[in-house]
Amino acid sequence: MMELAKQKIIDGKAQNLSYIASRMQHQQDEIILAAHRLSLNLQQTLNIEALITAFCAESVSLIPCASVAYRNDSLKLFIYHGDKEQHLCRYSLEIEKEKLGEIECTSARPFTEQELMRLEHLLSVLVFPLRNALMYNLAVQSAKQDPLTRLFNRAAFNEMAESEVSRATRQCTGLCMLVLDIDHFKSINDNYGHLMGDEVLKEIATRLKLSLRTEDHVFRYGGEEFVILLSATDLPSARLTAERIRMMVEQKPIKKLGVSLNISTSIGVTEWQRGESSSSLFQRADQALYAAKTGGRNQVKVA
């Protein structure tokens, strides 16, 4: 009887160990499958938000996480999924000293070591596709950016103007456009040189960005001409914005390269009409700008 009882205990321990080993293998298989699914999904896109969304889906099911947030301050990217909870873990993502941003995950309870290991396994799958997507995103943004002023360029304007018109059509919201020209810009280049002209353009670009809302867009259309898209804005508000910009430029001299210059601008303003194309909207704003210039400059005209 003693031998039989002893054998049962031994068998019982063997069964427990076998169960633990089986469970560990199952958990390991879960991690491998999740990493494989994530890898396949990450290979299908260079869209950063799509990458983070795929990572979130696997993290939520495998860890689980209540929320996942990705931040890249240098590229002004912030992507957030879920509802933030009390307990968090944060990882700085980096490859060969190249910073890729930060991932923050939260949970209603403290993360276990096993959950952190799972999360780190998924992060190891994410980092290389994320770097490729960031490089692609940077290349796309560079192609749409004016190298001197760091504003969006004409190509970006053509794309965003179409997008804003489509949004205004769907949401039945207002949309206005400002076309701005620096008065007598040629004389600045002729009298003070092109370096001074470049400084004037950069300063005007900075002032325009500071004077607008985050949802508005400003572009260097070409030469000394700038275009501003004002989302969800009616014509009276757009005219007030244009007057504020005109006065801001006129009242503060530009002091660069040991020179102080009094600058003025002419601005054309127009409001989008339902059914109107983005090219027609620009043409009307440009005609208003022409009226402001021929009417004496340093003024705002409405189409």
Image: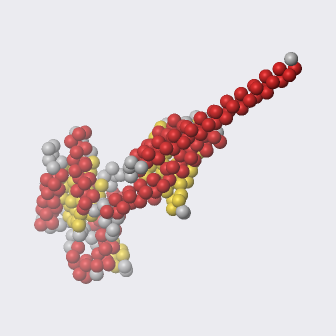
Q: Is residue 155 visible?
A: yes
59 to the left or right of 184:
right
Return the residue nearer the eye: 201 or 57. 57
Quadrant housing the N terminus: top right
Residue at 28% of width from left, 79% of height from top?
194
Quadrant housing the C terminus: bottom left
> Picture coordinates of residue 14 (x, y %)?
74, 29
Return the residue nearer the eye: 269 or 32. 32
Return the residue nearer the eye: 105 or 153. 105
> Picture coordinates of residue 30 (x, y %)?
55, 37
Residue 195 in the image: above or below residue 36: below
Q: Residue reaching furthest top?
A: 1
> Picture coordinates of residue 207 (x, y %)?
34, 63
Return the residue nearer the eye: 9 or 207. 9
Residue 235 in the image: above or below residue 185: above
143 to the left or right of 302:
right
Can you tell which quarter of the image residue 218 is in? bottom left
> Picture coordinates of residue 4 (x, y %)?
83, 20
Residue at 28% of width from left, 66% of height from top?
250
